[in-house]
Structures are given as C-alpha cells and as structure tokens.
Image: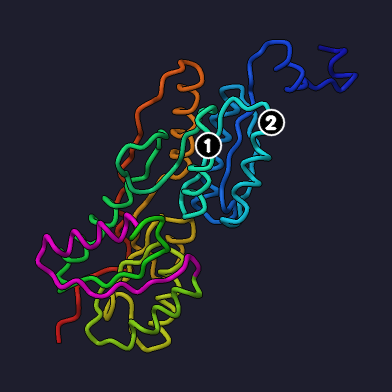
C-alpha cells in the first residue's frame, strides 16, 4: 500500500475487464443532467453503483436527432449494462434504440404496462390524484392544472388529476400546457389570473408553481386566500418560498438507487427483474387553503 501511495497507482477498469472477464462499467443516458429530478436520480444511481463496485459513465442525449449516435458511442464501451432516465420523449426513444444484447433498465414517472425493459417508477399518477383530492377536500369546486410536457398522450400527473376530478364529479377544466421552467409557469399564471373561476391550481412541478404564483401576485391575487397553488416534486426551495409551497414529494435519489438495484440484479443473476414502484407523499404547506367565500 505504501508503494501504491508513492506511485499514485490507480486500477485500470479496462485492464481488469480483460483479465477477469467481468465488466464493471454502467452507462447512464439522459436528456438533461441539470434539472432537479434528473440530477437527483443521477446522484442515486452513482451512489448505488459506487457501493456495488461499478463505474458510471454519463451520456447526455440532447435531442431525438442524437439518439442513434449516442447509443453507438455508448455501445463502443465494454458495458456491464445501461440505465436510461426516461422522463421525456428523448428518453423513450433512447430506451427503444438500445439493443437487447445489453441489460438495460429505466427510471420513469407513472407506471405503465410491462414492456421489454424493467422500470423503476415514481408513481406520479398517484401523486397527481392525491394532490387533486386534497384540494377538493378544502372546498374548491374544481382544480385547474398547469401541465409539464408528457412522454405519452398526457403525463401521469395529468392522468391522476383528471381521474380525481371525474371520480368527484367535479368539472374538468382545460389543461394549460407549459414547459418545465418558471417562465412558462408565469405565462400560464397570467392566463389563470384572468379567470375569476380559478381558485385552485395543481402545477406539474415546483418551478411552474413559482412562476404561477408570481403571475398571480402581479394580478393582485393572494395565495392562498384567493387562489391555492400546489407544486410537484418538493424541490429544496419549495419550503423556503413565500408562502411555503404545498407540493407532492418525490424521492428521486431513491429512484436512482432502485433503478441501479434492478440493473445489478439482472447483471448478477441473468434474470429480468420485476418493476419497482414508489408512491409519492403529499406535503401540506401555506400555499393552499380553503376557497374564499363570496
């Protein structure tokens, strides 16, 4: 060990693979590494991989046009397996492009019918449903929805919102479609602020909720006295906002760990693992309340 320290020796993963025949590199492919959900999921994957003795490489696939090239680049490495963060349409395309010759698992939102790839899910459909039920329980006639982009016809959060309204026989307002960022939430909030029927809003993520609240404040609407606003994800800033943001907490770091756990099971046993799912939790803070009585 003294010689190792003096020489600055570091094991060479490629050389170890040639000698042992055991591959220790896992590729992670994602469209984004900066946004909260992606970054926290990556953290969980890396932590679990390090504990299991695997090395993680990260490939950012910025658009659908880059999928084939990115997959070719990843497959040029001696891989033990791969993980796709399937939070968007690029992630869906990337997952489909990877061959069956490599164990591949995916991290995703709402559960879906079992496909050819194992998935670890955050059941955001359940989260959207419970958030909507909570707002209705406060006495709101209905709940408006500012939606994030969906990988399918609509996001799990939107499906849960719609189901809760229909089961309560509440009106189902038209969805306000937005991006992921506060600026698009602000534009959605300006539309909602102009509608006197709006008393409760479920946003597809916390960043949209912040933009919505800014627009409501500029229009003279108080949160929650005039309009209740609920986010989704429970990003670190949500509790520090004024008023503190009610939201749906999703444990993305745990999602990353669970996803990598599925992959290790597949690599080490050779058997395709079952999907894994976790239900998010409701976080009640000061941005939601009963509607004002006229």
Residue at far right of view? 7
Q: Which residue is mark 2?
A: 77
Region in magenta: 154-181
User: Would you identify the image quadrant in which residue 65 lies?
Assistant: bottom right
Q: Alpha-carbon neighbours of circle 2 within 10 Å: few (<14), some, or many (≥20)?
A: some
85 to the left or right of 289: right
- Model colouring: rainbow
Q: Is residue 87 above or below residue 79?
A: below
Q: Nearer the viewer, residue 129 or 242?
A: 129
170 falls in the magenta region? yes
Q: Is residue 43 above or below residue 235?
A: above
Relative image position of residue 23 (x, y in whole percent): 64, 20
The kind of secondary structure element at disc 1 is: strand
Quadrant where the image shows the C terminus = bottom left
133 to the left or right of 275: left
Q: Is residue 46 above or below residue 287?
A: above
Relative image position of residue 150 (x, y in whole percent): 40, 59
Quadrant where the image shows the N terminus = top right
Q: Nearer the viewer, residue 192 or 263?
A: 263
227 falls in the magenta region? no
* Residue in the picture at 55% in, 42% down: 42
191 to the left or right of 38: left
- Say which label, 2 or 1, has the lower sequence index: 2
Relative image position of residue 277 (x, y in whole percent): 33, 38
Q: Is residue 185 above or below residue 234?
A: below
Estimate the spatial distance between the alpha carbons at disc 2 and disc 1, rounded to whole Å: 14 Å
The kind of secondary structure element at disc 2 is: loop
* Residue in the picture at 68% in, 40% down: 73
* Residue in the picture at 90% in, 19% down: 7
Q: Which residue is mark 1?
A: 83
Residue at far left of view? 169
């Amino acid at each position: 060990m003294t010689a190792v320290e003096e020489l600055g020796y570091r094991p060479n993963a490629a050389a170890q693979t040639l000698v042992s025949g055991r591959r220790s590199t896992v590729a992670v492919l994602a469209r984004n590494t900066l946004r909260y959900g992606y970054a926290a999921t990556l953290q969980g994957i890396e932590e679990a991989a390090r504990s299991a003795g695997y090395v993680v490489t990260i490939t950012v696939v910025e658009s659908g046009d880059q999928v084939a090239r990115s997959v070719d680049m990843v497959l040029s490495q001696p891989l033990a397996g791969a993980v796709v963060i399937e939070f968007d349409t690029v992630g869906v395309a990337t997952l489909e492009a990877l061959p069956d010759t490599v164990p591949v698992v995916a991290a995703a939102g709402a559960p879906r019918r079992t496909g050819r790839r194992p998935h670890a899910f955050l059941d955001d459909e359940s989260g959207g449903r419970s958030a909507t039920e909570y707002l209705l329980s406060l006495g709101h006639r209905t709940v408006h929805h500012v939606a994030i982009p969906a990988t399918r016809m609509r996001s799990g959060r939107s499906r849960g919102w719609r189901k809760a309204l229909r089961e309560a026989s509440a009106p189902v307002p038209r969805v306000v479609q937005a991006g992921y960022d506060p600026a698009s939430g602000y534009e959605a909030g300006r539309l909602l602020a102009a509608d006197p029927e709006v008393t409760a809003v479920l946003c597809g993520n916390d960043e949209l909720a912040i933009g919505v609240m800014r627009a409501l404040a500029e229009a003279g609407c108080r949160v929650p006295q005039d309009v209740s606003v609920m986010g989704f994800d429970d990003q670190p800033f949500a509790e520090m906002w004024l008023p503190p943001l009610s939201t749906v907490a999703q444990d993305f770091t745990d999602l990353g760990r669970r996803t990598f756990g599925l992959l290790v099971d597949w690599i080490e046993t050779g058997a395709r693992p079952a999907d894994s799912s976790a239900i998010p939790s409701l976080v009640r803070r000061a941005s939601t309340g009963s509607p004002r009585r006229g």
